[in-house]
Image: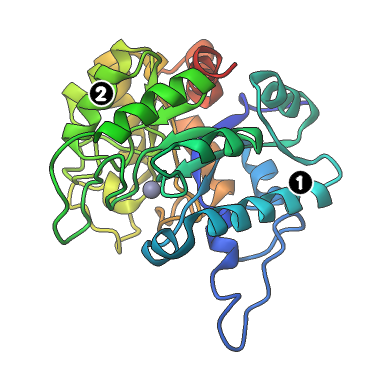
Amino acid sequence: MDREFPPIFDGHEDFPYEMRLGTTGFPPKPRRDFLGGSERGQVDLPRAMAGGLGGCFTSIFLTDEQAEMGAVDYAMRLMADVYGLADASAGRFRICRTVADVRGCFSDGAFASVFMFEGADPISRSLKELRIFYEAGLRLVAPTWSRSTIFAHGVSFGGHLPETGLTEAGRELVAECNRLGIILDVSHINPAGFWDMIEASERPIVATHSSVKAIAPHVRCLDDEQIRAIAKQGGTIGINFANGFLRPDTKFDQDDTPLELIVQHFRHIIDLVGDEHVSFGTDFDGTDVPAVIKDATGLPLVVRALQASGVGEAGLERICNGNFLRVAEACWK
Ligand SMILES: [Zn+2]
């Protein structure tokens, strides 16, 4: 198919969570039409296709309450929703388990969805659930969201969380992900946990949705030393489009964030460690993004601005999807 630029494989999207918002209230809101398209949220199939978005790591995100009161149940419910989309899509939205699956979607113009856990809350100390979720398509795990799990502690969005690194169970989780062929994600983990993961993992690690701390000094962003460590191991960093992670003032509720600032985050990593280590990590349907982007249809603006900043054809391919797929090749079976 004809494309203006290589299909974007996005490091992090939260549509399974967003699609359920309000649907259990009273009166319940109907679930939005992901396959047919709607005005709600930031991504659906028509807007993905219009924006050159070829697929993503699809986040299984749980609220604190869900994580505490039935993480396995809620995770299965969200995954079943995504399977429902795939089943109703006549092949236009597919759950992918291999790099060949993802590339097949790219060549057929279908959306490539790969399951990720944004927090390993559904996994118990024995890790036995991990094997089952792997069979269901889980291919990327972040040990924790911005809270604590039995594996690690996140960076806090307010309130106090421990500053210690991976627990013993966390080290076992890293080893088991390496063994099974599941990519590890350092987005949301605290600095001690970050460095423990870098040390413990035998495979490249990614930050699916983290921006540059040198530009936006937020606790969720990565400093230059962390960026170098991810790069040294062969990993990549998906730039998060949350206003608060892009802006020097770290304000989430200001959406006049300029396009140039998004490009600066990409450029910072390119100039520091090369274009092999930066990707997209929009956080669509999980956060407020700049008004100039609005939703998935705004992605071509970023691609064109990257090209204008000097990113060539091969670099663009790497940034759009090649870097994540290289890590997947190194980690998945
Ligand atoms: Zn997140």
Residue at the image point whose x is 18% and y is 30% from the top: 223
Residue at the image point whose x is 20% and y is 25% from the top: 195
Q: Which residue matches tag 1? A: 86
Label 2 – label 1 distance at C-alpha: 35 Å
Closer to the camera in the image, 51 or 238: 238
Measured as percent of width and height from the top left, residue 219 is found at: 19, 45
Q: For numbered disc 1, what is the local secondary structure?
A: helix
Question: Residue flagged by tag 1: what amino acid is it?
Answer: Ala
Horizontal relation, residue 282 to residue 150: left or right: right
| Vertical comparison of 315 with 174: above or below | above
Closer to the camera in the image, 87 or 288: 87
Mark 2 neighbour class, 10 Å CA radius: few under 14, some 14 to 19, many 20 or more: many
Residue 264, quarter of the rendered image = top left
Q: Nearer the viewer, mark 2 or mark 1?
A: 1
- Name the image quarter holding the C terminus: top right
The answer to whether marks 2 and 1 mark residues whose Cβ atoms lie closer than 8 Å is no
Residue extending furthest bottom?
Answer: 27
- Name the image quarter holding the N terminus: top right
Q: Which mark is residue 227?
A: 2
If you read the primary sequence from the N terminus, does the residue marked by circle 2 or circle 1 appear first?
1
Closer to the camera in the image, 311 or 131: 131
| Vertical comparison of 213 with 21: above or below | above
**Mark 2 lies within 8 Å of ligand 1 (Cβ measured):** no
Residue extending furthest front?
Answer: 126
Question: Residue flagged by tag 2: what amino acid is it?
Answer: Ile
Measured as percent of width and height from the top left, residue 235 is found at: 38, 19
Horizontal relation, residue 174 to residue 49: left or right: left
Residue 213 visible in the displayed image: yes
Residue 7, quarter of the rendered image = top right
